Image (cartoon, grey):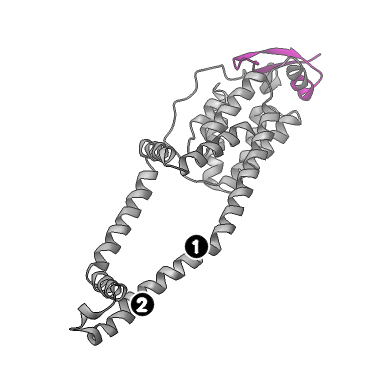
Amino acid sequence: MPQYAYRALTEAGERVAGEIEAGDRRGAIQRLQAQGLIPIEAQPAGRGALPGIEAPAGRPARSGGRQAAAVTVATRELATLIGAGETLESALALVAGELADRRLRAVFEGILNRVRTGASLSDAMAAEPRIFSRLYVGMVRAAEATGRLGEVLRELADLRERQEALRRQLTSALIYPTVLMLTAIGAVLVLLLYVVPQFTPVFAGHEDRLPPLTRFILDAAAWLRTHGPTVAVVLASLGLLWLLASQIGSLRLLGHRLTLRLWGIGTLARERATAEVCR
């Protein structure tokens, strides 16, 4: 019976290599899975030594891109291929070849290269924190330790699909009130900047006889015409600083911590995170 050289992961997440007898490559993979191993690669012995098990490659710079839907589809395909008996290496190669997004394809090719050098899948994915969250990487690491990689990837795909569906529902639900709010703000600004100033000369010299609400509206219109451009610049600058800060990991973490301490909002954020983990 032919001999097949293989590389695989044990249930404890340790990388092992060796040879196994099997009728064909698929049989070798099935025998490895029956032994509780997660096959990374298997090929006929003597065709060329498989790469040795080395330390994982150093982490590259973070890659951009937030293609959540494409990552979910890739996760589903990876789970299906591994469940069908493909090795981790060949499954990653097939998934990377099917991706239309060039940046995401480069991410999966980088993961494939790290796995080929001996890194575990979780370590390879941890090097792409912009694409794979800590929850995602942690679940993959737990799957490697229990030998349930295909099942856990399928559960991850289900979880991401539920999250994306909920995000779409929330976005749809918020569109109408957001449009109403922006319309109301725009109407108030038009009144204060263009309509109210036309009546200001009419009340000139009679301010002390005006009702408090009318005086407040006239004063607000005058203040806004004087300081409006400065306020607009300050708000735009704060928005830009917020966007820049959200790209810096330490500042983003600080923002998350402050959010968790906010009354009401922090409780909802903790409950949402707990629900994600418990699912």
Identify which residue, 187 or 58, lies in the foreground. Answer: 187
Give the SS element for disc 2: helix
- Asked whether residue 98 is in view, the answer is no
Query: Is residue 27 shown in magenta?
Result: yes
Q: Position of residue 129 (x, y in %)?
A: 48, 35
Q: Position of residue 113 (x, y in %)?
A: 54, 30
Q: Which mark is residue 191?
A: 2
> In what quadrant of the picture does the N terminus appear?
top right
Identify which residue, 264 or 42, lies in the foreground. Answer: 264
- Seen at 27% across and 81% down, the residue is 197
Going by the numbered disc 2, the residue's amino acid type is: Leu
- Seen at 74% across and 14% down, the residue is 35
Q: What span is colored magenta in the figure?
A: 1-29
Going by the numbered disc 1, the residue's amino acid type is: Thr
Q: Position of residue 77 (x, y in %)?
A: 68, 39
Taking 63 as reference, is 37 above or below it?
Answer: above
Q: Is residue 111 left or right of residue 151?
A: left
Give the SS element for disc 1: helix
Identify the residue at the far left of this view: 205
Q: Are marks 1 and 2 in contact (CB under 8 Å)?
A: no
Q: Which mark is residue 178?
A: 1
Q: For the residues marked 1 and 2, what is the alpha-carbon distance in whole angstroms?
A: 20 Å
> In what quadrant of the picture does the C terminus appear?
top right
Identify which residue, 223 or 31, lies in the foreground. Answer: 223
Query: Is residue 52 shown in magenta?
Result: no
Taking 130 as reference, is 190 above or below it?
Answer: below
Q: Is residue 120 left or right of residue 58?
A: right
Total of numbered circles in the picture?
2
Q: Earlier in the sequence, mark 1 or mark 2?
A: 1
Taking 22 as reference, is 185 above or below it?
Answer: below
- Asked whether residue 244 is in view, the answer is yes
